[in-house]
Image (tube, coloured by chain):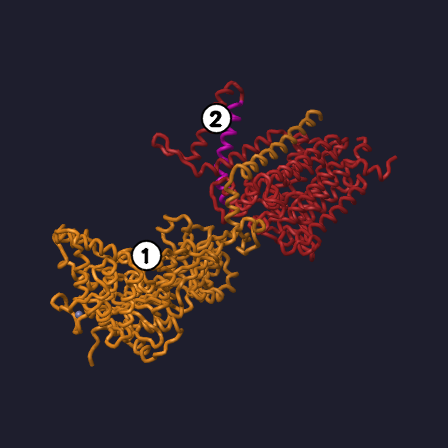
Chain colours: A red, B orange
Amino acid sequence: MRTKVSIFEEIDWLSVALYAALVFFGWLSIYAANYDDQSSQIFTLETNHGKQLLWIALASILGMILLLLDHRFFESFGYIIYGISVFLLLAVLLVGTEIKGAQSWFVLGPVSFQPSEIAKFGTSLALAKYLSTMGVHFSQTKHRLRTLAIVALPALLIMLQPDVGSTLVFLAFTLVLYRQGLSSWYFSLGFAAVFIFIMALFLKQYEWTVFGIIIQGKIAFLAGFTGLIALVYYLLRKVKGALLILGGVFASTLLYFFSVDYVFSNVLKPHHQNRINELLGIVSDPLGAGYNVHQSKIAIGSGGFSGKGFLQGTQTKFNFVPEQSTDFIFCTVGEEWGFLGSLILVFLFLALLIRIIWLSEKQRSSFTRIYGYCVAAILFMHFSINIGMTIGLAPVIGIPLPFFSYGGSSLWSFTILLFSFIKLDSERKFILR
Amino acid sequence: MDELENRKVFVIAAFVVVAFIFLTRLFYIQIIDDSYRSSADNQALRYVTKYPARGIIYDRKSQVLVQNQAAFDLMVVPRQAEDIDTIAFCEIMDIEKMEYKERLSKAKAYSSYRASIFQKQLTSDEFSRIAESLYRFPGFYGQKRTLRTYPDSVASHVLGYVGEVNAGHLERDSFYRSGDFIGISGLERQYEAELRGERGLEVLMVDVHNTVQGKYSGGNRDVEARAGADLATSIDLDLQVYGERLMNDKKGSIVAISPEDGGILALISSPSYDPNLLVGTKRARNYQLLASNDSLDPLFNRALMAKYPPGSIFKLIQSLVALENNVISENTGFPCNKSLVGCHNHTSATNLREAIQMSCNPYFHQVFKRLISPGKSSNYFVDNALGLSQWAKDVEDFGFGQRLALDLPNLKSGSVPTTEYYDKIYGKRRWAFSTVYSLSIGQGELEVIPIQMANLAATIANRGHYIDPHLVDKVGKDSNVVWSKNETGITKDLFEPIIDAMQWVVEKPGGTARKARIDGIEVCGKTGTAENPHGEDHSVFIAFAPKDDPQIAIAVYVENAGYGGTWAAPIASLMIEKFIRGSVSDSLKENRILEANLLDVEVDED
Ligand SMILES: [Zn+2]
């Protein structure tokens, strides 16, 4: 039989090392982002880096506790934690505190946290539990709908806050479903929808003159698309029902294409419109909507190959970059450590993500495997949106960089996500199922 | 499930693709595209020019003639000043809102991110009044400058003034940047390269609120400003001040030289102006006022630029040249034949000393005739031309008709007419003594500037040579300026009769410059009264003292003041006594001069 000592022997120390490296690198960046010559004390709770040190200490204890829990806890309490999450998401809509336009925080004296952080964990557990239940087959429509409901319920509640960033994170679960058998056609459809959305907005600003006729960008796109459909039809003309299918595709694309404009200008809020316009390069307003990204790119871009050196960054330290400890923490890495530092950071994340997938696939328990995919997918989503935003490849959506960004609430929730997986993984040799 | 397990490859591929896209993008913005680096520098770094202190100018006793006072340019970085409380700012600066907008858009036109001058040359008092509220107005900061200040408000024509560089300066000399100062006249211009020093640079880090956060890179990129070199001049401040007081309400000039080393003790051009008027922001307006004053023309430096006929003082040169060329001896006498040229009533001079003392015009008419009739040619015209050539050469050896080596700009040369000059006007062999005889008494085509007259006095005091008259003896701590010695070619002994006569001019009863006498100091001098076709004659007096150990040589020229002995001579004597003794004993003489107003010749007689 096994002892407690053997639990630690089975822990995947590589994941723990990657975690520790990211947390340490993150703390250094927070220290640098708030550094000034007058007060360079490390152990003080008056500064962000001092507080973060405390959060890190508490997160380590949290990780230890998770490792000492019985592995059956996660599976047994999966639905309960999910239920609590949903309850808290409802409660926050009623009694939460509004910060930066979203009613997404509980503030209890000095402590404040976002229920959406727990919801990611709860949804992951619930999803893993449901999909690993005997008799549930993802190929069945009934089960698919229930799966969708598990994910969509918290996502919708978060959207009501409204917290666009956290809602988008829930899209990460499609990656998990893909592994469970979701057709890749859905991804193609998703990409096509995004592509057409961008084209519809992007081409508005262009027009060409051909043989004296002014051709608007939109018309050119539609002409090309019609031609393409016609070509496909010509190739498939012998196939039964091709006309019907192609006609349907053509009609729905047209409808979608023209509704983009309407949705963009009537559903999206002006500051979202601005951010998308800025991202697509349709407008450039480095002092207004584009200020954050503009400054962020200057900070990162000015780092050069090897960076300005630890504590030598000017853009982040002197507050040119907004929220340089939280959402834009990557700027400090880019500015002070340059391309080399950025490369290391990207590799650390990539290594952790691949390690989690690798470990997940080795599981005999499908609960652990699915949960592992959830963890990887959530981390990946945060990583992509956060870094993408700082270098102008994604719209400005305020979500933290896992393990890196300042803040106890986000550090703990990512620690819980990851260490629950490490705990579950450490049990794999003793699980027969 | 095997088929689905393979999907892990696609999931991992998605991670790798995103990571690869990020790294490509990072590679582009961090390594390929330089523009982010310069944007960062423009925003977070402030390049502050450290202006050097301009060299200080001292007199011969190390008293300050011109020094520096702190001033501040109020700078603005338009991009950072966008959200300030304009109303409060305008109130503090005491300007209209329209004015504010205008200046800011001018600054913006230059650059939104770089600092330009919002208001220049605030005095330190003005600046300290607004400095304490500047923190409320990000984008504004003070840039330390220095302005000239003249403690005694004197010697404006010697020192000159500085002004901001203009487009021409910027184009000619890459040393200058817009907003720099440059010497425009006087010593400031002559010694610009020595006085200006070298600009320094300070690179500071500023935060998003434009608050300075310390030196960039530990001050590695900073360059210290190097102060300009100080100038030690030969000017005697007390004498200069005194001379300017004496020349108050008079038109003319005084130049005093130390004969021993050529150093200029005082250089006064009157009317003058307070040099402090041409400092800082008020310079342009005051300059306009001074320049538009046609009748007094205070900006005109008479000591260097005004050309006058030398009048009777020229008889000293005539005597020396005649003696050297052996056309007369010190015992030669000529009758006072008024049919040759006008004269006053006196007994005929029986020797050279008497002729000089009595300033007999016909005497020098005859001396000059001998000088330009050397008998080298049987042709009268050719002979006169040869004579005049030799004479002109000898006269030029006294520094006449040529630019002296004085270290001030805009120095005129005056003129000594040559054979070529008359040939051009009258034609070759078409002129002779009868055409040019007025040169004999310092009239005619002769033009001399006051400093050349003072130099003549110094040359006679030195018995035959002069050191380049100059102002600066030392640049910086230990770099002495070397000035050369110039010989007239006149034998030293020949000066004795001339100097004796000059002493008689001052001391003998009937001498023309009795008003120049000083008890206990042997003054040697010569008066002159230059005919002025436009009005009252000009009063001239040159002198040196003491006779046997000359310490000061001086020329005083007072325009429209009539006879030389009346005004120029007493002024010179006051200057001499002031310099040698440090004070003046004859207060009656002093008061008469101080109170005299000779500016307005057509005074109402009531
Ligand atoms: Zn006579």
Between A348 and A103, the one lying in front of the other is A348
* Chain on which label 2 sits: A
Magenta highlight: main SS: helix
Amino acid type of the residue that numbered disc 2 sits on in the rendered structure: Leu
Corner quadrant of residue B243: bottom left
Between B172 and B518, the one lying in front of the other is B518
**In the image, are marks 2 and 1 on the same chain?**
no
From the viewer's perspective, tell me whether residue B413 is left or right of residue B419.
right
Corner quadrant of residue B564: bottom left
From the viewer's perspective, tell me whether residue B249 is left or right of residue B2.
left
Which quarter of the frame holds ligand 1? Answer: bottom left
Q: Is residue B210 magenta?
A: no
Residue B350 percent across, percent down from the top left: 19, 69
Determine the residue located farthest toward the bottom in the rendered image: B606
Mark 2 lies on a secondary structure that is: helix
What's the magenta region?
A: A241-268
Q: Is residue B132 visible?
A: yes
Residue B44 percent across, percent down from the top left: 53, 50
**Quadrant that contains the C terminus of chain B:** bottom left
Corner quadrant of residue A417: top right
Q: Is residue A248 magenta?
A: yes
- Answer above or below: position of B596 versus A250: below
Mark 1 lies on a secondary structure that is: strand
- Answer above or below: position of B241 versus A252: below
Between A166 and B282, the one lying in front of the other is B282
Residue A228's disc number: 2
Determine the residue located farthest toward the right in the rendered image: A1
Residue for badge 1: B487
